[in-house]
Amino acid sequence: MRVKQPEGKRGSLKWIQRAVNEQWTSLNQPITERIAGNATIKWLSPIETDDYAEYCDAAFLRRIGQASLVDALADYWPTRGPQWDALGETTLGDVLLVEAKAHIAEMCSPGTTASPASRLLIDKTLTGLAQHLGARRKHAPWSDYFYQLSNRLAHLHFLRTHGVSAWLVLVNFLNDGEMGGPRTSEVWEAAYEVAFHVMGLPRKHPLSPFIIHIYPSVPIDGA
């Protein structure tokens, strides 16, 4: 699905659109430094000339050049999966899956509202992923708590298991005073520590090498 977006006026929608289209160094550089210093990034969404569109499901796979995985994704996750805040690729062939936040409350996503049939597939996938990542046996159900973060991890895992050099980039904006966002990376780090604790995840797990946390600062005047 390709979902047109308005030009963002506030919060993470505004800032990820600007960061991508203005090629913020504070967005690109931490990513390339983590992956490979000589790589450059081509952003695939949200692009101004593409209606700032965001992508999910089969359209997301086609956008990143992985149309051959459409049937496999349908067996792994039902339709109306993650709608990515941004998608990119590097000159070295890496795929970037971006989730952007401007304030802590955005992390507290509601649980899935999927139909019973879709919920069965989601629970099966997330249960298997939790076991693979070494989550504690007694942890909050991922379909109900931090569901957005868990389904992003699931799609990172899906691509990695199909041979795609994918990375989950968690873009945590600083200094968004309008939204009451954090001013330091330490506040974001503490929030993620709580989230991963609730999810039962250890500090290091099989996907952690492919998760990148970055902290771009928005213009202080908000302009």
Image: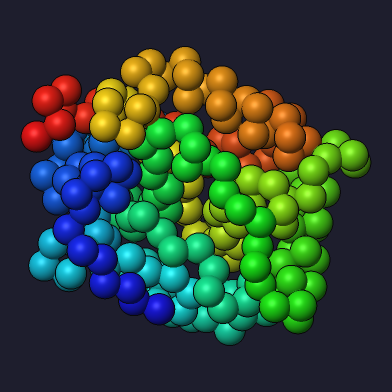
Residue 203 seen in the current view: yes
Residue 159 position within the rendered picture, expressed as x and y whole percent measured from the top left: 55, 61
Q: Nearer the viewer, residue 207 or 201?
A: 201
Residue 12 placement (x, y as % from top left): 32, 44
Q: Is residue 211 above or below residue 87?
A: above
The answer to which image quadrant residue 45 occupies is bottom left
7 relative position to 192: left or right: left
Image quadrant in which you'd find residue 155? bottom right
Residue 93 image offset from top left, x and y in percent: 35, 55
What's the residue at 48%, 74% (across, down)? 57
Residue at point 12%, 25% (across, down): 221
Left or right placement of residue 2 versus residue 10 in this view: right
- Residue 183 vs 140, above or below: the answer is above
**Quadrant location of the N terminus?**
bottom left
Image quarter of residue 101: top left
Depth check: give the residue in front, 158 or 13: 13
Comparing 16 with 177, the one in front is 177
Q: Residue at x 18, y 69 (%)?
A: 51
Residue plotted at (38% across, 16% down): 184
Q: Is residue 67 left or right of residue 8?
A: right
Picture layout, residue 13 above or below residue 222: below
